[in-house]
Amino acid sequence: MPDKKLFGVTALFDSPDGILNAAKKIKEDGYKKYDFNTPYPIHGMDDVISSKPSKLGYITLFFGFSAAAFILSFMWWTLAISYPLVIGGKPYFPLPAFVPITFEFTVLLAVLSTVFGMIAVAFNLPYNSHPLLDTEYMRNVTSDKYGAVIEASDPQFEENKVKEYLKSLGGKSIELIYEPEELKLKVFEPRFLVFLTIVAVLSSAVTYISLNKLMYLPPFDFMLNQKKGSAQEESSFFADKHEMRKPPVGTVARGFLPYEFLGVADTNQFYGNPLLPTKKVLALGQEKFLTFCSPCHGNYGDGSSRLMGQFPPGPTLHSATVIGYSDGKIYNIITNGQNVMPSYAYQITREQRWAIINYIRVLQRSGNPKPSDFTAINKTDKESGNVQN
Amino acid sequence: MSKIESGYIKRELPKNIGNVGLVLLVVGIILSILAYLTDPARAAFAYLTAFIFLICVGLGSLFLVTLEYAAGAVWSVPFRRISEFFASSVPYFILLVIPLFFSMHNLFTWMNPEVVARDKVLQGRMVYLNVPFFVVRDTVIFLIWWLFYALLIKNSRKQDISADQNLTSRNIKLSMAFIPIFAFTISIISFDWMMSMTPKWFSTIFGVYLFAGSTWVALAVLTLVAVLLTENGYLSPKVKRDHYYSLGTLMLAFTVFWAYIAFAQYMLQWYGNLPEEIIYFIHRWAGGWKYVSLTLVIVHFIVPFLILLPRSSKTNPKILVFVSIWIIAAQYLDSYWLVMPDMVNNGFIYSFSWIDISFPIAVVGLVIVLFNSMVKKYNLIPLGDPKLQRSFDFQL
């Protein structure tokens, strides 16, 4: 037969002992590329041929770890970064909740990669079949015979010598096995590609039509047009006739703390300001003071109202009384209002209130400076180089 | 019947092993008595930790013996005696539990009538959690274990001389009866002695958690001793790497099983976040316990898992010895983690104390002394077992 590449020479043996002895001999005689096929695992074969442990485990390990890393970062990105959702009051990245998914995905990919890796190694891809498959030899060793094969890639291989050699070991029905002849991949044949395109177009069309058209024939409808109540409507369903439901009594919003000094008569005893007068805090305080406080109390807190008498001017914040107020007292006034001043609890957040109080303290200090303040100012002015006087 | 060539020659263990065991036992007992005299409450908790560990080793070994019979396992026959010797502490449970019965008022809040009077839920649980019922059911459980141990071991030893195959089938029947009873009783013991320390907490998987740990540590002590004895020529020379590999695989399997159960318990309660459930884990996260809990995850799962994962380490005697010792220590840590944080329920404040070390010394001493005396009296290999020859022929 011309141009047929020889894969190897096979021989059949009748007993497990026969194949074990043959295996020992073949190994002793220095052959390197050989294999044995038996209907069931034969004890002792592993010791005789001392095959190297398979490398398949590393494929499994690699894909297992990759899967774990991928799915963890995927969940982190989708649920904590791209679209953060509070689920069950848990953090955005609740690791324990993600462990089962990570485990499942790790196992899935590890198993799939093992199966495909095994197929790739056994079939010697891109071949889609091992040369030994579909031969008389394979039919025998899968029923009641024990087979040995010496491959043509062995450095000692000589066709006739190996034939004689296997016969001398007691092998019967010596067979020559050739590599499969045509191995052109059928995937790239035009007929197949056309078929693939038609299937792709058809399945997309069917999916599109069934999901976007058939699903919305009456009685189905787009959610936009479905009957539903909107927020401010009167409800015919709920007893209180509100379409919009109220949270249960005692619900506290995330990140919100209720007013700390509720029901405390003398707020003057509270001093604690949770914010330190840093540059950032004072800038925030200044911004909010100029927005909400300065219309009545004046830009410097001296009571020079910007409202030109349209509204009773606010008192100065530089008076001894106000300087004597504790931070808690001022906080209470901003939150609850005093005299004609209304509550600012809804306009100014807790943090902004404490920042404003820090800024008011700065204003008060600038109204009653200490000698040390001047030396400090001169020092900073000299350093920054804009000495004015 | 022809005699099986096992290659086993009965020899006594080196003298220092018995001596070391005896010294540890005596020192441990003296320290434990001192502990009881100085701080009876603290000592009760430390004693319970050690007692739970001893139950894990003893009962887990008894379970391995019955598992071999029930599953018809062949490869493990040369190792069965080792598990039997480790199970020899089972008859002593009934004696060892007596000091714990006397310190129950220190261990359990539900013993305090004032606490119960304030709490409606606890009052409902008093049907189960009351001292007479508690003492009676636990005593009965220890007696049942003793009974099964005595019957199984008697048959097994008789077989050494008579080589009667009927004894094996009798033991198979006993094992079949024991395994469901074991599952039920180990759950009761774990509920009674550990879960009821946080009296309103409940976890139905808790018994399985203790089972996973106990089988794991029983496998570890078995592997440790089996490998050391084989390597030093005390066991049969026919024990091969294939036998080692099977032991290693089982240890790996139970490492993963424990992690699975522990995580299943944790995740459900963490997710539910119900006050009566999550309090158990809050106690194990408060203060320094956070680091113990995280260490447990690493020591009890990640490290043994990674060590045992490669095929080569399951057949390497040195690695097997190392990982067995590691597992024994990890299981003690688990036992410690189960018991100690619950001190806070009774108003005690936890801090590490020498008392924690005195009881494990006594337990290790006890196990060594019992094992050594068993080796003196009995064969290390069940010579009359009908499966023995097949187990020597065992191949992966």
Image (cartoon, rainbow, N blue to C red):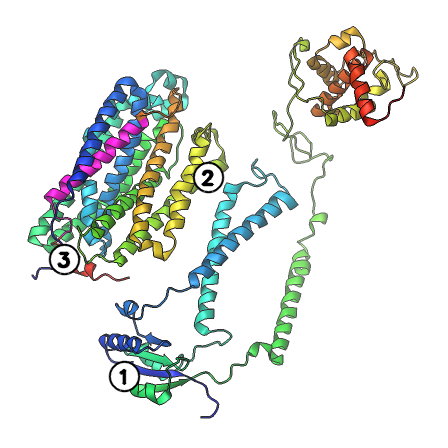
Q: Residues within 10 Å of mark 2 (few under 14, many from 20)?
A: some
Q: Residues within 10 Å of mark 3 (few under 14, many from 20)?
A: some
- Determine whether B21 is above or below B167 in the image: above
Asked if disc 3 and disc 2 are in contact, CB closer than 8 Å, the reply is no
Q: For mark 1, what is the residue?
A: A171
**In terms of depth relative to the viewer, which is nearer, A67 or A6?**
A6
Amino acid bearing label 2: Leu
- Quadrant including the N terminus of chain B: bottom left
Q: For mark 3, what is the residue?
A: B6
- Mark 3 element type: loop
Amino acid bearing label 1: Gly
Asked if disc 1 and disc 3 are in contact, CB closer than 8 Å, the reply is no
Is residue B387 visible from the viewing direction of this image? no
**In terms of depth relative to the viewer, which is nearer, A142 or A19?**
A19
Q: Which residues are magenta?
A: B356-382
The spot of residue A17 in percent (x, y) is 22, 75
